[in-house]
Amino acid sequence: MRKIIALSSFVFLFLLAVLPATVSHAAETNANAVKITGITFVTDKGEIHADRDGNDFSLSLVGFPGDAKVQAVKVTSDTAATISLLSKSDEMYSDAVDAQFVNGAAVINKEKVKNWSTNNNDDTYYFLFPKQANTDYLFTVQELRDVITEYDLFLEGNGFVADAQGNQSPFSLAVETEGWKWENGKWYYYNDHAVKLTGWLEVGEDWYYLGKDGAMATGWVNVKGAWYFLKSSGAMATGWVKDKGTWYFLKSSGAMAILYVSMKYFY
């Protein structure tokens, strides 16, 4: 199964690693008051842009090179002044956990994280990414995928953005570490180490067959002497299937039964 997590504390660490804010949050939250326009992971192999649905974002690391070095996390907004893990109504809230937007962006890099860790005596970052003590980047893509997998980080964690007038809105980010990816006109399934899978694959309640090159199969395939039919979605069919005017019966395993019934009429 593909792994999707909500934005959790280790990601928020980077959003908090900037100077304290001077703008106060409003006690009331308005979902439409302040909009984030983008969340981007900046790497040495290109940028990874999160998909946006309002203030809800999803970012896919599926198939991305594991050795890519994430140099910064950039959050953009036309109206936001600060970004925070906590709402002002939270009893643990303080201005010290805000991050500021400068020229429409809050950019979190290694220097800011180091300053945060030192000034607040907080070793969370180095606990999660122990190899990053002496580097100039935040982490590699694979290190992030490994942290998500190792700690099974399916954590709820919405953040908040506020404008200069104190209006406040929530936002969220989900990170996908493994799953389907469309490449060169074909579907492939990558595991959380960016490896293309081959052979039979179960996703949810459906089975798929991936060829030797990892491409998802459709139509008829012969596997170890047995015929299987994969729908246009790639999902394996069972029961009766009509193909080019002929009906075939597929066992519960998906394998075609030896006998089939032709629905053609003869006079």
Image (cartoon, rainbow, N blue to C red):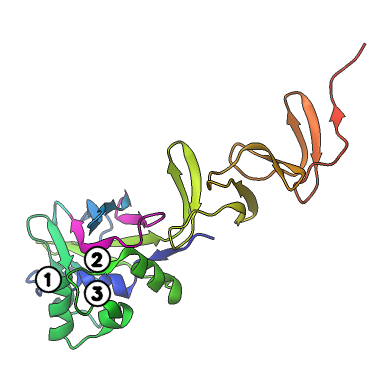
Task: Answer with left or right where residue 260 lies relative to residue 210.
Answer: right
Q: Is residue 16 visible in the rendered structure shown here?
A: yes
Please give the residue where the numbered disc 2 appears in the rendered image. Answer: 160
User: Residue 187's spot in the image, x, y percent?
Assistant: 50, 43
- Front-lying residue, 31 or 231: 231
Task: Answer with left or right where residue 130 lies relative to residue 175.
Answer: left
Please give the residue where the numbered disc 3 appears in the rendered image. Answer: 13
Does residue 187 sit above or below 104 in this rendering? above
Q: Could you classify mark 2 by the number of other residues whose Cα lies within 10 Å: few (under 14), some (14-19), or many (20 or more)? A: many
Q: Is residue 169 visible in the rendered structure shown here?
A: no
Residue drawn at the location 28% of the way across and 58% of the way down: 31
Q: Which residues are magenta?
A: 52-76
Q: Are discs 2 and 3 less than 8 Å apart at CB? A: no
Task: Answer with left or right where residue 237 lies relative to residue 30.
Answer: right
The C terminus - image quarter: top right
Please give the residue where the numbered disc 1 appears in the rendered image. Answer: 24
Label whose residue precedes the other's in the sequence (2 or 1): 1
Q: Could you classify mark 3 by the number of other residues whose Cα lies within 10 Å: few (under 14), some (14-19), or many (20 or more)? A: many
Which mark is nearer the camera, 2 or 1?
2
Question: Magenta residues: mostly which secondary structure?
Answer: strand
Residue drawn at the location 64% of the way across and 51% of the way down: 206
Residue drawn at the location 23% of the way across and 69% of the way down: 138
